[in-house]
Image (cartoon, rainbow, N blue to C red):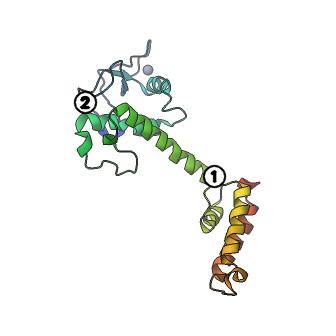
Amino acid sequence: MRHQRFHGRYEDSERECEAEGCREPGEFRAPGPRSPSFDGPGDTRWFCLDHVREFNSGYDWFAGMSPEEIIEAQSPINGWRRDTRAFRADAGADGLPRWADFDDPLDAIGMRASQLRARAAGRQAYAKFTLREQEALGVMGLDPQADRKRLRSRYSELVRKYHPDRNGGDRAHEARLQRVVEAYQLLRKAAAFA
Ligand SMILES: [Zn+2]
């Protein structure tokens, strides 16, 4: 069987999408009625990308994900099929849950999918800020999901921490305090906090 392992897309021209009336090549695997287990890979159904998304949306794992993310989330199926799960050299290397941590490969896929979604959400949250504002968030140790209230409370927390009046006149933190003040001045006017 000829397939591109790294994308989870099987380019086997023999197969046709199993969705009724669809004539597209069936290049994507979906679990059939029998789940994969240690006894074997389970039943497999084959769909085109549109129909595998439709099929998968019934599982609610892939809702709102891009085709690339779906493909990435599906790739463990290939790994499972070809390698002994627990001994994959790259197990866990991407920081996502290890394949071997789950009894049921489908659980692993679902977990990876939700973590990929969370990563995408994190990137999206940062996208609301300019680069300078993102730096300022870093100076203040804030995550991009912080709201205006959190911004204010973090600011007063840091001012208390670094202000010389609070440190027995010690000016050691002066530069740090200055950066915090500048970061706050920038962020309080940021569109994301409007
Ligand atoms: Zn189709």
Say what amino acid the circle numbered 1 marks. Gln
> From where the camera sits, is residue 4 visible?
no
Give x and y (percent) for residue 105: 34, 33
- The alpha-carbon separation of the residues under discs 2 and 1 comes to 41 Å
**Quadrant including the C terminus:** bottom right
What's the residue at 28%, 36% (across, down)?
80
What's the residue at 25%, 30% (across, down)?
38
Give x and y (percent) for residue 24: 41, 21
Instruction: Classify residue 25 as left or right of residue 156.
Output: left
Which quarter is ligand 1 in?
top left
Q: Which mark is residue 108?
A: none
Quarter-of-image position of residue 11: top left
Q: Are marks 2 and 1 in contact (CB under 8 Å)?
A: no
The one nearer the camera, 161 or 20, is 161
Quarter-of-image position of residue 28: top left
Q: Identify the element where label 2 is drawn.
A: loop
Q: What residue occupies the far top of the structure in this picture?
A: 21
Say what amino acid the circle numbered 2 marks. Phe
Q: Is residue 96 above or below residue 29?
A: below
Instruction: Classify residue 174 as left or right of residue 29.
Output: right
What's the residue at 23%, 45% (across, down)?
87
Q: Is residue 71 above or below residue 142?
A: above
Q: Label 2 neighbourhood size at 10 Å, few (<14), some (14-19), many (20+)?
A: few
The residue under label 1 is: 145
Q: Which numbered disc, 2 or 1, marks the residue closer to the eye?
A: 2
Quarter-of-image position of residue 109: top left
Q: Which mark is residue 38?
A: 2
> From where the camera sits, is residue 125 visible?
yes
**Quadrant including the N terminus:** top left
Q: Label 1 neighbourhood size at 10 Å, few (<14), some (14-19), many (20+)?
A: some
The one nearer the camera, 10 or 101, is 101
What's the residue at 27%, 27% (across, down)?
41
